[in-house]
Image (cartoon, rainbow, N blue to C red):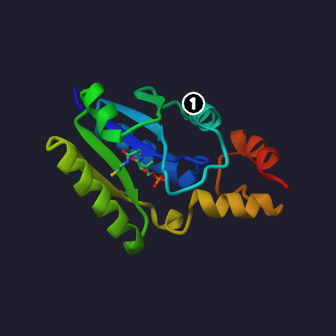
Amino acid sequence: MKLAIYPGSFDPVTNGHIEIISRASKLFDKLIVLVSVNMFKPASFTIEERKELLEETVAHEGFTNVEVDSFDGLLIDYFNRRKADVIVRGLRAITDFEYEFQMAQTNRRLCYKAETIFLASKTEYTYLSSSMVKQIATFGGDISDFVPEYILDRIVKRLKK
Ligand code: PNS
């Protein structure tokens, strides 16, 4: 059984993340979407809130082989504990590459078995990021094109100033 982990801040989950979850879940027997801590990015949603939004997304989209979990530690420790095979990350643009390459190399240095596979984002999501969604929602803009309707209200209420 091939087990993949898709880690990220998911602060909050966007349509771009959902597209990657959908495609990755078809490539592996099981996919764990892991809410992780990025020390370099201040989060707006708590880990628990981010996990809840993802759980609702997974249930709503009917992803039957996808589990949502969170981990407040090193990704590679979680990877080893779950005996995973692959780390999945989405690549939106060339600007993502250096950061992603560094993470992949570091994780592989920490554990030689940790392969990272990149899925190229769908063109319509290459511009989309959680940070942009947060900025737009905070100032009362319309984010309905960027997050699914079933969690839209919750995100808007939580972020509106
Ligand atoms: O969505 P993001 O913020 O780009 O995801 C980055 C994330 C959370 C996957 C990365 O910061 C991470 O793996 N954090 C867990 C701690 C860790 O293992 N850091 C070393 C990564 S090389």
Amino acid on which the number 1 mark rests in the picture: Glu
Give the residue furthest to the bottom.
Answer: 94
Quarter of the rendering occupied by the N terminus: top left
In the picture shown, does residue 76 fall above or below 101? above
Taking the spot 71% from the left edge, 63% from the top edge, the residue there is 135
Quarter of the rendering occupied by the C terminus: bottom right
Ligand 1 within 8 angstroms of badge 1 C-beta: no
How many labels sit on residues?
A: 1
In the picture shown, does residue 124 fall above or below 36? below
Expressed as whole percent of the image width and height from the top left, the position of residue 75 reads 35, 40
Give the residue furthest to the left.
Answer: 112
The residue carrying pointer 1 sits among few (fewer than 14), some (14 to 19) or many (20 or more) residues within 10 Å by Cα, namely: some
Taking the spot 47% from the left edge, 41% from the top edge, the residue there is 36
Expressed as whole percent of the image width and height from the top left, the position of residue 6 reads 39, 42
Residue designated by label 1: 55
Provide the secondary structure element on which disc 1 rests. helix
Taking the spot 61% from the left edge, 60% from the top edge, the residue there is 131
Expressed as whole percent of the image width and height from the top left, the position of residue 143 reads 72, 58
* Of 39 and 88, the residue lying toward us: 39
135 vs 110, left or right, is right
Expressed as whole percent of the image width and height from the top left, the position of residue 37 reads 49, 44
